[in-house]
Amino acid sequence: MNATINAPLRSTINELPIRVREAAVFLGVSPQTVYLWVERKQIPHLRVMGRNIRFLKSELEPFRAQFKQEIGNGKTE
């Protein structure tokens, strides 16, 4: 198989989930905003052991790009 095709898959498998506080820093918002987005199902997230919320940076990157584009255009809803 082509190694280029497998590279993104390997990085996702080896990627460690991050916590709410780390996700907030990565996105440039408060942890409360991250919790609100999770509650509204507006952000990709994982539930671990029921209550613990984790995120994959690879899934947050497109969300962050969209979020920054909307803020730049004056849209916050």
Image (tube, grey):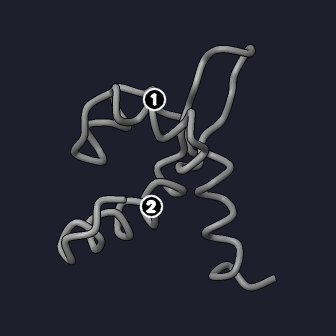
Near mark 1 (Cα within 10 A), the count class, few <14, some 14-19 or many ≥20, is: some
Determine the residue located farthest toward the right in the rendered image: 1
Which residue is at a point 22% across and 66% down the rendered structure image? 71
- Frontmost of labels 1 and 2 is 1
Which residue is at a point 46% across and 49% down the rendered structure image? 57
The N terminus: image quadrant: bottom right
At mark 1, the secondary structure is helix
Q: Nearer the viewer, residue 9 or 33?
A: 33
Q: Which mark is residue 63?
A: 2
Q: How many marks?
A: 2
Near mark 2 (Cα within 10 A), the count class, few <14, some 14-19 or many ≥20, is: some
Mark 2 residue type:
Phe
Which residue is at a point 56% across and 41% down the rendered structure image? 40
Q: Nearer the viewer, residue 16 or 62?
A: 62
Pointer 1: what residue? Answer: 35
**Alpha-carbon distance for marks 1 and 2?**
15 Å
Which residue is at a point 29% across and 71% down the rendered structure image? 70
Q: Nearer the viewer, residue 56 or 45?
A: 45
Q: Is residue 52 above or below residue 44?
A: above
Q: Which corner quadrant of the image does residue 10 belong to? A: bottom right
At mark 2, the secondary structure is helix
Q: Nearer the viewer, residue 10 or 17?
A: 17
The answer to whether 67 appears left or right of 36 in the picture is left
